[in-house]
Amino acid sequence: MKILLDRGKCTGLGICESLSPDVFEVDDEGALVLSTDVVPDGKLAEIRAAVTSCPTEALRLAEDR
């Protein structure tokens, strides 16, 4: 699965980072940085929680094509 980020919606609150710090990081400028855009093995539940917890709906999951 792929992690999709809509930078126009992201406000850098960091909820995703608190739920999955290995994948999401809010940098010093308040921008979200993804360490990968592919869900790592064993992290799907963690990433789903981050996606559903995003108050601005800036994160989505999509099937690999």
Image (tube, rainbow, N blue to C red):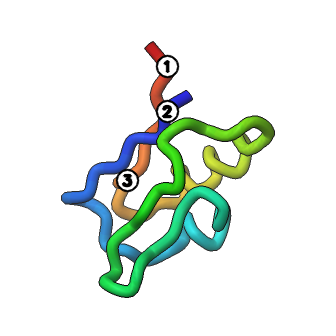
**Residue 10 screen position, x and y as percent:** 31, 64
In the shown orientation, is residue 38 left or right of residue 55? right
Q: Give the farthest residue toward the front.
A: 35
Count of marks placed on residues:
3
Q: Give the farthest residue toward the left.
A: 8
Q: CA distance from mark 1 to mark 2?
A: 6 Å
What residue type is disc 1 on? Answer: Asp
Q: Give the farthest residue toward the right.
A: 42
How many residues crowd around disc 3 within 10 Å: few (fewer than 14), some, or many (20 or more)?
A: few
Q: Residue at x 26, y 57 (%)?
A: 7
**Pointer 1 residue:** 64
**Residue 50 screen position, x and y as percent:** 58, 56
| CB under 8 Å between discs 1 and 3 | no
For residue 2, the mark is 2
Q: Quadrant of residue 58?
A: bottom left
**Residue 21 screen position, x and y as percent:** 64, 67
For residue 42, the mark is none
**Residue 64 screen position, x and y as percent:** 49, 19
What residue type is disc 2 on? Answer: Lys
For residue 57, the mark is 3
Q: Is residue 52 above or below residue 29?
A: above
How many residues crowd around disc 2 within 10 Å: few (fewer than 14), some, or many (20 or more)?
A: some
Q: Residue at x 54, y 62 (%)?
A: 24
Q: CA distance from mark 2 to mark 3?
A: 15 Å
Q: Earlier in the sequence, mark 1 or mark 2?
A: 2
